[in-house]
Amino acid sequence: MRIKLIIATEDVMYSKLISDNMSEFHSGSIDVSVSDSVKSMQEMLSKRNYDVALVDTAFINEMDISAVNMPLLLWSENDSCSDITDDIGLINRHQRISSIVAEIFEQYAKVSKAGRSVESGNANITAVWSPTGGVGKTSVAIAYALSHVATGKDVFYLNLEDFSSTPSHLNDNGKSVSSVFEMFENHDGNVNMLVQGISCKDRGITYLCRPDNFDDMSILTRENVNELITACAELTDELIIDLPCSYDARTRKAFELANKVCIVTDRSATSDTKLNQFVLQNNVFESIEKKVTFIANKDATLKSTFAEVVISLPFIQSIDERVVCEKLAEHVLNGDAI
């Protein structure tokens, strides 16, 4: 969905800075128009329906707020907002443009109708999982994402771990994914739009920042996971899901939605033992077997007879996770494609 947005302010330099940024980085999601006078604002609102209006204090009382779905006041600490009605939201004008964009989507998603069916999606979905911790599952997932970025694809990385490792690989200074969980809890709003608005980008990878606390992730239901995955899938070419090592209804839902399941192991006896248990004692493996690729990480040799599709990755000696992922991505690009 593309939001029709009007910016109404007499500060021409400010509106140009925001509109230019939105046109360059958010043209696929925001259709922006600009007005620098009350008269032009009123004329534009009379000729076209807008979803959102960003209006400064000099214009807000001259605007017919019923002409837009969501009017937002651009305010600063020096402005008095005591006479602003509950029909008008607030956005601090003195913050990063990326934060302003995220706030627009976050607020509009709460009043917007839901988008497409949760069963729809555009991306090729890859779920990365292991029954054992410490095997390099997240490094493999990020490396896979980087390898797709290098080929020019849009890539979305979705971390569903109980304790997120996203900050060790990607900048984590954006809006938390917890705002999506709050929308699930309230059973209201447009999840697709919210995900689109709060997504961050680093190293060419689009992603959601870690939750505010552990409980936010632990209360996710199978239905929540379904909606979150399909919302992300509508925004990208490749969706990589980094799953926790636990095996529950949420993991099974991710397996069902995935086009490919990468199961990561290393050369430890613990990893081999747990992987054998999953394959031999869990009937779910039979339902996903045709889309499973085994990743033997850290120079591991997968000895199990069930491994029909195996990719071997080298052991990268570095304490910097970013270096590890970049080296693994190079290996994927130059040889084995996951």
Image (spheres, rainbow, N blue to C red):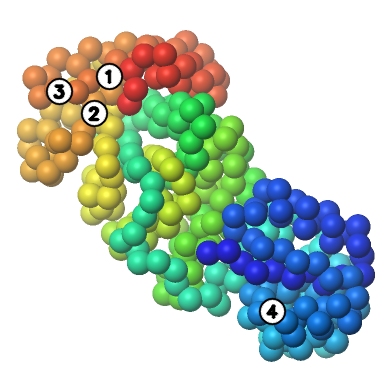
Q: Quadrant of residue 117?
A: bottom left
The CA span between labels 4 and 2 is: 51 Å
Residue 112, x across and y down, in percent? 53, 75
Asked whether the residues under the numbered discs 1 and 4 touch, taking CB atoms below 8 Å apart as contact, a structural biologist would say: no
Identify the residue under disc 3.
Answer: 307
Q: Is residue 138 left or right of residue 273?
A: right
Check disc 2: other Cα within 10 Å, few if <14, some if 14-19, many if 20+: some
Whichever of labels 2 and 3 marks the residue nearer the N terminus, that label is 2
Q: Which residue is mark 1?
A: 311
**Residue at the spot of label 2:** 293
* Residue situated in front as seen by the camera: 211 or 194: 194
Camera sees residue 116: yes
128 above or below 312?
below
The residue beneath circle 4 is 48
Does residue 275 sit above or below 2 in this rendering?
Answer: above
Q: Earlier in the sequence, mark 4 or mark 2?
A: 4
| Residue at x-position 92% and y-position 65% | 11
Does residue 294 sit above or below 55 in this rendering? Answer: above
**Left or right of 147: which side holds 269?**
left
Q: Amino acid at mark 2?
A: Thr
- Marks 2 and 1 in Cβ contact (< 8 Å): yes
Residue 29: x %, y % from top left: 59, 58
Confirm or deny contact between disc 4 and disc 2 (CB under 8 A): no
